[in-house]
Amino acid sequence: MASQPFTIKWGIMATGGIAQTFTKDLLTNPASRNVNDVAHKLVAVASSSSKESATSFLEKVKAPDGVKAYGSYAELVNDPDVEIVYVATPHSHHFQNTMLALEAGKNVLCEKAFTVNAAQARKLVETAKAKNLFLMEAVWTRYFPLSIKIRELVQSGAIGPVYRVIADNSFGNDGPNGTLTFPDEHRMVNPDLGGGALLDLGIYSLTWLFQILYHLQPEAEKEAPRTVAAINKYSTGADEMTNIILQFPKHKSMGVGMTCLRIPTNTDGQNSGGPAIKIQGPLGEIQVMGPAFSPRQYRVIKGDGGGKIEVVDCPIPKDPERDWGHGMFWEADECARCLRDGKKESATLPLSESIVIMEVMEEALKQGDIQYPEVITTAVYDPKSPLNTGGK
């Protein structure tokens, strides 16, 4: 008889769109993606505004009976049945919310961008280590089988040493008279919520630069990049277009990360404009078709290939019973395996790397003179912060 899968019990903090998508993925049957060693149980969901909002969330995701609905984050993190908390709040709230969970003794998977600045990221890591808890930034793309295959291809020397990676993750939200189609209070452009292209979309461009140019560096030769950035500001004060060059002088490599809220990476919705990511070495290049956050195809072009292009499709599996599968389940499986094996961080995205990525974003925002309010940038934990209480 096959051994039972290791099951972890989840609490979901927040009830917005990303929380719904992740939770629906948690509720899929792992066997539908050929996973048999781990499983997930949804235990509780919390809204900071009301219990009704949490109850409504459970209906929307078609949760099984018996899942608890809370009207405060404090109740969720103090539920003894919850083993790990998924923090799905806006970036502005990540530091305070993750601290709330860690201080209550909970393991945490925190949405990207990890925090609003590097000091907050360092404080989260320090706290998790001091309390011997698991902590991971939820950069779901890193855990895609496609990403794993591409990292293995690069490591195998298929295109020689990678000297350049170019990555774009942009949305087409251009509006009339210099506006964007988001209202000013929307999380994408509202500085009070850590809005702007970089923290929300540019993190994925950086994910591709980092998982190839930084992550694959041998530990003994780890080199954090130099950062040069150019930013166009929106009328709200958030960044609407940001371009970053990362330079790794010792490795003779560079990365170009682009993000924008006015023009989409994928012009016609069919990827006719070509790849979102290009990974280039002297022997060839690997092209990843967008979107950068959820790619389903890559191409390998060899310098001596005579024009032949190897095309590899990596579809995201669906659970036929729930008619659902988005690709966020792979990062959840990673959390389960880490907890099963007693690991406090993921080797695929070590906490030290999350900090370096945060340092790059902070430096870019500084170069572009993007400023966020003190309540969301402070690295001082406050359980009674309005970010933890919903202003109640």
Image (cartoon, helix red, strand yellow):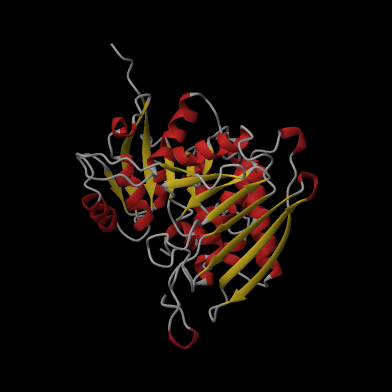
Q: Residue furthest top?
A: 1
Residue 316: quadrant of the picture: top left
Please state the horizontal and vertical placement of residue 66, each as a whole percent of the image.
Answer: 22, 39
Instruction: Please determine whether, in this image, residue 278 is positioned above or below residue 25.
Output: below
Which part of the image, by quadrant, shows the N terminus? top left
Please state the horizontal and vertical placement of residue 134, each as a whole percent of the image.
Answer: 53, 35
Instruction: Please determine whether, in this image, residue 271 is positioned above or below residue 139.
Output: below
Q: Kindly identify the residue that appears in the image at 62 percent across and 45 percent down.
A: 303
Left or right of residue 53: residue 212: right
Q: Nearer the viewer, residue 198 or 369?
A: 198
Which part of the image, by quadrant, shows the C terminus? bottom left
Please state the horizontal and vertical placement of residue 321, each as a whole percent of the image.
Answer: 19, 39
Q: Residue furthest bottom?
A: 177
Q: Kindly identify the residue that appears in the image at 69 percent across and 41 percent down.
A: 161
* Residue 37 visible to the viewer: yes
Please state the horizontal and vertical placement of residue 120, each as a whole percent of the image.
Answer: 62, 53
Residue 344: quadrant of the picture: top right
Instruction: Please determine whether, in this image, residue 374 is positioned above or below residue 7.
Output: below
Q: Nearer the viewer, residue 62 or 55?
A: 62
Q: Residue furthest front?
A: 306
* Residue 122 visible to the viewer: no
Left or right of residue 323: residue 216: right
